[in-house]
Image (cartoon, helix red, strand yellow):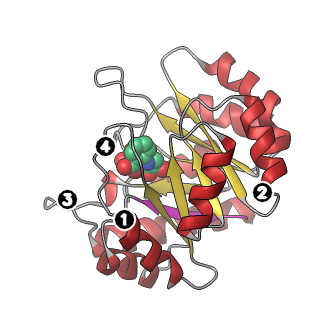
Amino acid sequence: MKHLIQVAGIIDRQEAQLIVNEGVEWLGFPLRLPSGRDDISEQSAIAIIAELDQPHAGVLISYLTDAGQVSSFCQELGVKAVQLHGDISVDEMAKLRQLRPDLCILKSLVVKEDNADELLQLVDQCASYVDMFITDTYNPKTGAKGATGLTHNWDVSAELVKRSPKPLMLAGGLTPDNVAAAIRHVRPAAVDAHTGLEGADGRKDAARIRRFVAEARQAFAELAA
Ligand SMILES: O=C(O)c1ccccc1NCC(=O)[C@H](O)[C@H](O)COP(=O)(O)O
């Protein structure tokens, strides 16, 4: 699970193919969002996920907070990984771990202006039940916790990397222009981007993805050296 790249917000099969062709390992599907406005139908997501071969994998990005519901939704979709983006309790994470030892569980840590201590505590509380953490950015203007296109204080993510016994994926406002600096600063195990890879038409842009992947791989190689 070292030095992975994830791209989130897949809209259709063509976009998934583009992302796979550019060498991105994980494809994130935000589904059953609280807004009720998913970018893709569950049926289309199931079909795309079924066509992915290792090392490529589909990841459910979910706000569900009930372990049983998360588990059955993952089964329906055919995903082997889930990103828990909502306020799921530590008890439910422990239940999910017990129900699905096979599932790769990522817990989101949404960085706000002043919640670093809270996030450090959360890492301590749930590290035994998850396989990876992902830091992301809160937008205080809209209340959004994901796909904000905003970076956060990378010192907080760097501190979480040092504290966590599990690998950490960095997300939030990453683009081809800042991903290398972000990796050097935070030293994460993985990176994720969504809106920073889109063109003016709101679709993923091949050239942006190519440059993002090249910049991230180069920075990861420097970390490994
Ligand atoms: O990607 C989404 O549409 C999304 C919506 C609501 C909550 C989380 C969501 N995605 C989580 C991710 O992993 C995103 O890629 C992450 O928030 C980074 O987005 P961006 O800042 O646009 O790169």
Q: Is residue 83 visible?
A: yes
Q: CA distance from mark 3 to mark 4?
A: 19 Å
In the image: residue 92, left or right of residue 88: right
In percent of width and height, residue 32 lies at 41, 48
Of tags 1 and 3, which is closer to the observer? 1
138 versus 113 height, above or below: below
| Residue 77 covered by magenta stretch | no
Residue matched to label 3: 202
Residue pictured at 77% horizontal, 31% vertical: 91
Residue matched to label 2: 100
Residue matched to label 4: 36
How many other residues sit within 10 Å of disc 3, few (<14), some (14-19) or many (≥20)?
few
In the image: residue 165, left or right of residue 181: right
In the image: residue 73, left or right of residue 161: left
- Amino acid under label 4? Gly
Tell me if the residue at label 1 has its CB under 8 Å from ligand 1.
no
